[in-house]
Amino acid sequence: MGFFFTLVALVVTLGLTWRYLGSYMEAVFNGRVHWLAWIERPVYRMLGTSPEQEQTWKRYAGAMVVFTFVSLVFTYVIIRIQGSLPLNPQHLGAVGSALDFNTSASFVTNTNWQNYGGETTMSYFSQIGALTVQQFVSPAVGISAAMVLVRGFSRRKSPTIGNFWVDMTRCLFYVLLPIAFVFGIIFVGEGAVQTLAGTASFHDVLNNVSQTIARGPIGFMETIKQLGTNGGGFLNANSATPFENPTGLTNFLSFWLLLSIPVALTYTFGKMVGSIKHGFALLAVVIILFGVWVGYTANAEHQNNPAVAKAGIVATVGNTEGKEVRFGDTSSALFGVASTSTSTGSADSAYDSFTPIGGMGLLTGMMMGEVTPGGTGTGLYTLLIYAILAVFIGGLMIGRTPEYLGKKIQAKEVKLAGLGSLVMPMVVLILTAIAVSLVVGRAGPENAGPHGFTEILYGLTSQGNNNGSAFGGLTGNTPFYNIVGAIDMLLGRFGVMIPALALGGVLAEKDVVPESLGTFRTDNGMFVGLTIGVILIIGGLTFFPAIALGPVVEQLSHLRFF
Amino acid sequence: MLVHLRRSLILAVICLVFFGFVYAFAGTGVSQLLFKSQADGSLTANGSTLIGQPWNLTKCPGHSLGSCVFQGRPDDLGPYSDTEKNNPSPAGHPGDDPLVLNGVAGESGATNLGPKSAELVKYTKDLVKYWHARGVNPTPDLVTTSGSGYDPDISQQDALVQIPMVAKATGISSSKLRALVVSETHPAQWGFLGAQYIDVLQLNEGLAALK
C-alpha cells in the first residue's frame, strides 16, 4: 500500500515538474530569465561571446568536442596529482593512469561508471574539483545538445542553431545550480553527511567495537548526482549507504530529482516548437514504457530470493539480498528502473543480487537507448531520433513523404537518425563479444555461468549508454576493462550526440511545409504507439540474442519465469 | 579551433571555481550552520545511528557471544565472522570491508552475489544454522546482507524473532522486550515512503537501559 502511495506521489510531483520546470527551462534557453544576470554577463565577457553570436551546427559541435576534451584533461590531471593537492585528510595517493582515464572519461560523458571505491580512492579535492564539477558540466552539455535538435524543429531556414557557450552558461547557473543547492540542504537535514573534517572514530561500550567511518562533502554532491542524471556517488555503495541516502524521503527525492529534468524537457520541447501536444505525445511514450518497466521489475523483486529459499527460509517480504531495510524491495526496484531508464546509474541496492528477470528489467531499460525518459538532454534527443524513425515508417505505410512538425523527413535525416540509433548497440555488442572472447575479459565476473555473462553485458551496456550503474560483481579495475570501458563511453556519447547535432543543423535549414489533410499526425495515440513500437523493435531485435544468453537462461534454469 | 580551446579553458576554470569549490564550501557552511549534527554524521557516544555495527561478538557471560543484544543484519562483520570460528577479521567474507575493526575506514559495498549463486546458498545456510543454534527462527533480512554493507536497521519482525534469545541471555521478560521493540519501531516516513525500521544501535541502547 505504501508503494502505491509512493507511485501516486511520484506521478503528482512529476506532473507539476513537467509543467513548471519545463516552462521555466523554455524561458531560460530563450533568454527570458535574468535573475542571475549579474553572474551570467561577466561569464559571457570572460568567454568573449554573447547570446547574439550564433553558431552553425558544425561550430557548435566543434566547441562541444573541444570543451569535453579540455574537461577530460582537467579531470585526469586533478585525480592524477591528488596526493600533492590540499583537502586530502585521508592522505590518499595518486590514482593509476588506466583507472584515472576510465574515471575521467566516465565523468565527462555523464556516465559515472566507477571502477574505484570513492571513500578509499578519491581525496576531497578530487571529489569536489574533478568529479562534482563534471556532474554539473556533463548534464549541461547534454541539455545543450538537445536544445540544438529542438531548435532544428522550431526554426525555419536558419543557418545557425544557437551558441554553445551561452546554452552551457544558462543551463549551469539557472537550472542545475539552484535546484541542486536547495535540495542539498534538505538532504543534509535528513542525515546526509556534509563535512570536510575527515573520518570519525569512536568506541562503542555496548559491544566493545571500535569503528572508523569515512565522511566527506557528500550531501551536496548527492543532489547534483541525481539531478544531472550522473549517478556517481561519493561512497562505493552509492545511494545504498545511509550517509548518501539516509531516509525514505531522500530515497523518494532521489528518484524524483533524477527523473525531473528529462521529463520536464518534453514540455520544454513542446513549448519551443509551439505545440505542447507534441511534447505530451513524447511524455506519453515515456510514461507507458516506464510504467510497464516499474510494474514488471517491482513484481520480480517482490519474489523470494532463490538462494534464500534453498537455505530453507520462505520469504514473505521479497528479495532482501543487497537491499536496505529502510527502503524495502519495491521502492528499491522503482529506484533501479528510474536510474537505468535515465542515464543516472545510481543505486540504492545491489543490482547484481536482483532476481534474474528483475536485473533484466534494469538492463533492458538501458538497451532501449535510455529514452524512458533518458538522461538530461540525451534522453530527449534520442527520443526525437526514434520519433523521426517512427514518422519515416509511418510515412512508408501510407505512401507519403513523412513530416515531423512540418519539417520534411528525407533521406539525409533518416540516415542521420539511423546512425544515431545504431551506433550504441553496435559498440555495446561488439565490445561484449570481444570481452567474452578474451581471457582478461572472462576474468572479470564474480558470479559463474549465465550470471557472469550478464555482468559483462551489463557493464558494457551501461558504459555504452553512459548510464554508469553496474552489476557490482564485475571486477572493472583492470587495464582491459578500464580502457575498453573508456572507449565504450566516449563512442556511446559522441556516436549519438554528433548525429543529433547534425540533425538539428539540417532541419533548421529547412522551411516548414503547411499541414494538409493527408499529413500524418504526430500528436495522437497512433503516433505514440508507433514510436513505442520502433523503440521496442530496434532495442528488441538488436539485443534479444544477448539477453537470451544471460538473464533469460538464468531465470529459466530456475524452472519458471515468474 | 583556437577560440574554442581558449573558451573551453576559461569555462573549465570558471566551473572548477563555481561548481567545485564555491558549491561545496557554501554547502558545507550552510549545512554546518543549520544541521550540524546530521552534517557531521549523526554521531552519538556509541557511534553513528546511520552506520551499522557488528553485535555478534558482544560478550555475554554464561551465554554464547552476541546473544544478550539485538543483532543487526549479517553485514560483513556480523554473524559471518562467528560462523568462521570466532575470527573477527573480515578477510574471506563476501563483500568488502566497510568498517575495519581498529583500523582505517574501508569501503562500503554489497556481496554482489547473484540469486543463483552457490556461494550465496552456502552463506545463507551457514547463517540459518547460526540463528537456529541461538533458538531464533530467522527472517530473510537476518540471513541476507544489505546494499551498503552496513545497514543500521532491521525490521520489527527481525527484532521480534530475536526476543527468545535476548530474553534467555539477559533475564528480561519477553513482554518487556516486546514493548521495547514496539516503542523503538519507526514507521515508514510520512506513512508511505520506504519501509518501517528499527535502528539497532538505538534498540540496544534502550535494552542497556532496561538492564
Image (cartoon, rainbow, N blue to C red):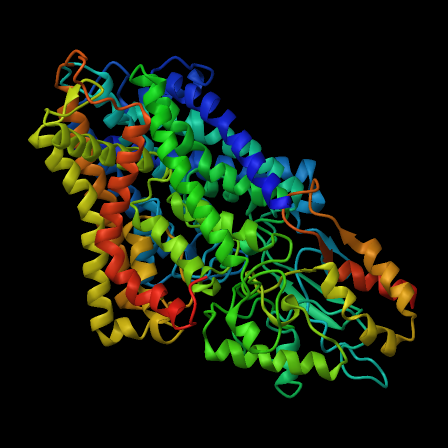
Q: Nearer the viewer, residue A164 or A122?
A: A164
Considering only vertical position in the picture, is A419 above or below A518?
below
- Image position of A45 with respect to A139: above or below: above
At 35% from the left and 44% from the top, the residue drawn is A110
Q: Is residue B43 left or right of residue B60?
A: left
Residue B165 lies left or right of residue A162; in this view the side is: right
Residue situated in front as seen by the camera: B28 or B179: B179
Residue A562's place in the image compared with A374, above or below, is below
- Residue at point 32%, 45% (across, down): A108
Q: Residue drawn at (10%, 37%), measured in percent from left and top?
A: A415
Nearer to the camera, A305 or A31: A305
Residue A23 placement (x, y as % from top left): 42, 19
Among the 4 quarters of the image, the one containing residue A546: bottom left
Residue B10 quadrant: top left
Percent across and percent down for residue B157 are 73, 62
Observer-nearest of A514 and A474: A514
Q: Position of residue A289 (x, y in %)?
A: 38, 41
Where is residue A352 drawn, in percent x and y?
A: 44, 63
- Asked whether residue A299 appears in the rendered view, the answer is yes
Q: Indicate the quadrant containing the N terminus of chain A: top left, top right, bottom left or bottom right.
A: top right
**Which residue sits furthest bottom?**
B85
Residue B142 vertical position relative to residue A232 in the rendered view, above or below: below
- Residue at 10% from the left image edge and 24% from the top image edge: A401
> Is there any visible trace of residue A125 in the rendered image?
no
- The mark tally for this picture is 0
Q: Is residue A203 left or right of residue A83?
A: right
Q: Is residue B179 left or right of residue A556?
A: right
Indicate the quadrant where residue A453 lies.
bottom left
